[in-house]
Image (cartoon, rainbow, N blue to C red):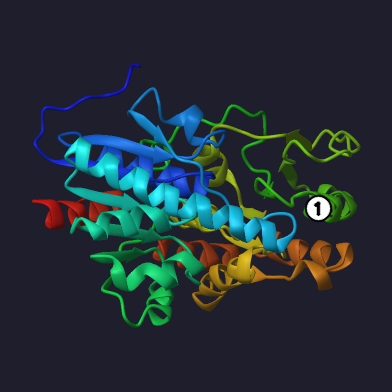
Amino acid sequence: MGAKQSTSSAKLLIAASGTGGHLFPAIALAQQLPDYSIEWLGVPDRLETELVPQEYPLHQVRMGGVQGRIGFSILRLGQQFFSSIIQIRRLLQRGGFQAVFTTGGYIAAPAIIAARTLGLPTVLHESNALPGKVTRWLSPRCSIVAVGFEAATSYLPKAKTICVGTPVRSQFLTAAEPLDLEIPDNAPVIVVIGGSQGAVAVNQLVRQAAPAWFEAGAWIVHLTGNSDPDANSLSHPQYIHRPFYPHMAALFRRANLSISRAGAGTLTELAITGTPSILIPYPYAAEDHQTYNAQAFVSAGAARLQQQSSLSAEQLQEMVLELIQSPAQLATMGAAAEGLATADSAQKLADVVRGLVG
């Protein structure tokens, strides 16, 4: 299988599934526990099936959310839920695991319940300022809940919490790599990143506002995602577009300003690189949690917040022009963003796990 094995007596099951926001912090934690024997719990056909098996043994259970007609969906979900608890409980017993770590989402609830029925310590990491439903429901059953934003603790009054930040990908913690894009050294750079879902509306606003930014001398690096039908509709010498870009740490460090959604992972990376931002929360995020994330950055003076429903291309155009023509203001915002960073978040999270498992 190619998965890492360890001779350590400490054995940990990590339950993290679905999106990069759930997987990357869990992978960062695992990398801080090289002496632990780590195995993974996920769901078929999700991102973990691509990222995890080369590093850690992967176990899978079927677990999802409510879809389709509500009555049949809840019945199916209930069957999956109780079946998953039984499967995970057997896995924990047979595997001799000593603890469970999870990052929330569908897989977290059966994993936490199975662990607690066996008396095993559980650590849940919640990256959002507004904790998800699973976190709010099951946090009192966890040994400890580690949060990415201090604001999250107020929603978890019955849980034992600790603020550790959110772990980031290793490229953000290593020496700065050179940017492999041909951009003049003195040109203002605007980075636009819409996130894995819902980027099209932001992309449209940016393309409409872009001519005025070009005229002001700015370059735009536009990460359009792979679901934008108009991704190739704008062409300009100062415009670089890609569906995705792998060297995000170098790109954020070069950027004078970012326009982005407000997922916890992206905000953590913007904080680590000290990048000022205009945040446009994804309007269909569960319980509007991206707005809560963005507000934490706005309150610190690190970002501007605009709701997509009320934002016009003209407003975005003027806001960006104001900022890129005010280096002092951008510097202040960047310093405020950096002040929100927890560069050693993964190590702090590992210390929490070690403190419980021994």
Q: Give the percent coordinates (x, y) of residue 148.
A: 40, 63
SS at badge 1 = loop
Query: Horizontally, is 78 left or right of 145 in the view?
Result: right
Residue at image coords 48%, 35%: 48
Q: Residue at x 26, y 54 (%)?
A: 115
Residue 41 in the image: x percent, y percent? 38, 40
Residue placed under numbered mark 1 in the picture: 216
Can residue 33 be seen here? The reply is no
Residue drawn at x 42%, y 48% as measured from the top left = 84
Q: Nearer the viewer, residue 240 or 345?
A: 345
Residue 288: give x, y in percent of width and height.
64, 70
Residue located 87% across and 62% down the image:
313
Quadrant where the N terminus lies? top left
112 left or right, relative to 313: left
- Identify the amino acid type marked 1: Ala
The count of marks equals 1
Compared to residue 279, the image places residue 272 above or below, namely above
